[in-house]
Image (cartoon, rainbow, N blue to C red):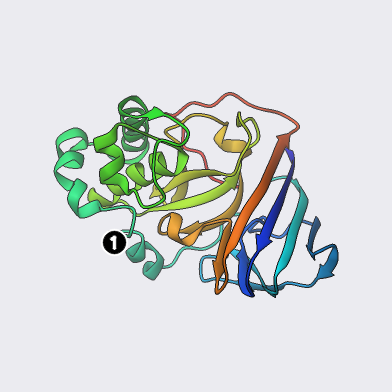
Amino acid sequence: MQRSVSAQLALRIDDPARLAFIVAAADRPALERLELRLDGAPVEPREVTDAAGTRIHLVDVDRGNVTLEYAATVDGRVDAASVTDVELLEYLRPSRYCEADRLAPTAYAEFSGLAGADLLAAVSSWVGTRLSYVPGSSLPTDGAVQTLLAGRGVCRDYAHLVIGLLRALDVPARLAAVYAPGLDPMDFHAVAEAYVEGAWHVVDATTLAPRSTLVRIATGRDAADTAFLSSYGGNVTLDAISVMAVADALPDDDVTRLVELG
């Protein structure tokens, strides 16, 4: 499978600021280009990698207009990284947007006795039927409990609820920000990953894109770890964003099948 992805951002910077971009494919593709400009002049970012393997591009800028252009071609599948005990423990704990402790009564009432692929399929279907996908219906501060009460949200809200329910059942779960060929309308996408049967497997209760086509950008406890842009210091306005992801094939997807992100 070959996948092509790209992102363009346009920002207005009112005061000097540090910008942290998370838009690059986590597993560095052979064909890749990232360009940053301030008022049309090239700016060289500094790349750092966090403990989860997320590539972050940092840059300090003065006032002006910043543009970012990223493009990459991903050939074939990416091998899964090794998993540590510390990692699995981290992704069992409640986090900012995934209140597993508060979701435990619901999780046990709905999914007791299920495990492995059966559990992931049941949680995916349950969340998918309980929520309505409504752009703009949630706030950046909403967590999984608020999403369940509201009965609506966007991809990150679906992922947070899936993660919270799985952690409540002692299944390690985490969030992945991805490029998603087949997504309509096109945007950055968020899915859950659960560690069952010795590997991380994708759970996407939105069913908006084939899981086998997804390209990992970032991995974390929840959306607090995976935002495509964070700013520190000055006032920053996002004026425009464009995301593209295509694959040479869009296979059918089946929520009962285990799929690894790669």
Relative height, residue 146 to residue 99 (above, below): above
Relative height, residue 223 to residue 182 (above, below): below
Residue under the image location 30 percent in, 59 percent down = 92
Residue under the image location 52 percent in, 63 percent down = 82
Residue 43 occupies which quadrant of the picture? Answer: bottom right
Residue 183 occupies which quadrant of the picture? Answer: top right
Coordinates of residue 146 in the picture (x, y in percent): 27, 43
Mark 1, secondary structure of its residue: loop
Coordinates of residue 63 in the picture (x, y in percent): 70, 70
Q: Is residue 174 left or right of residue 233?
A: left
Q: Is residue 212 left or right of residue 221?
A: right
Coordinates of residue 241 in the picture (x, y in percent): 67, 46
Q: Answer whether residue 203 is visible to the viewer in this image.
A: no
Q: Nearer the viewer, residue 94 or 96?
A: 96
Coordinates of residue 68 in the picture (x, y in percent): 74, 57
10 Å neighbourhood of mark 1: few (<14), some, or many (≥20)?
Answer: some
Relative height, residue 18 to residue 228 (above, below): below
Q: Is residue 17 left or right of residue 253?
A: right
Q: What residue is shown with label 1?
A: 93
Which residue extends farthest right?
Answer: 41
Residue under the image location 37 percent in, 70 percent down = 86
Q: Answer whether residue 182 is visible to the viewer in this image.
A: yes
Residue 80 occupies which quadrant of the picture? Answer: bottom right
Q: Mark 1 is on which residue type?
A: Arg
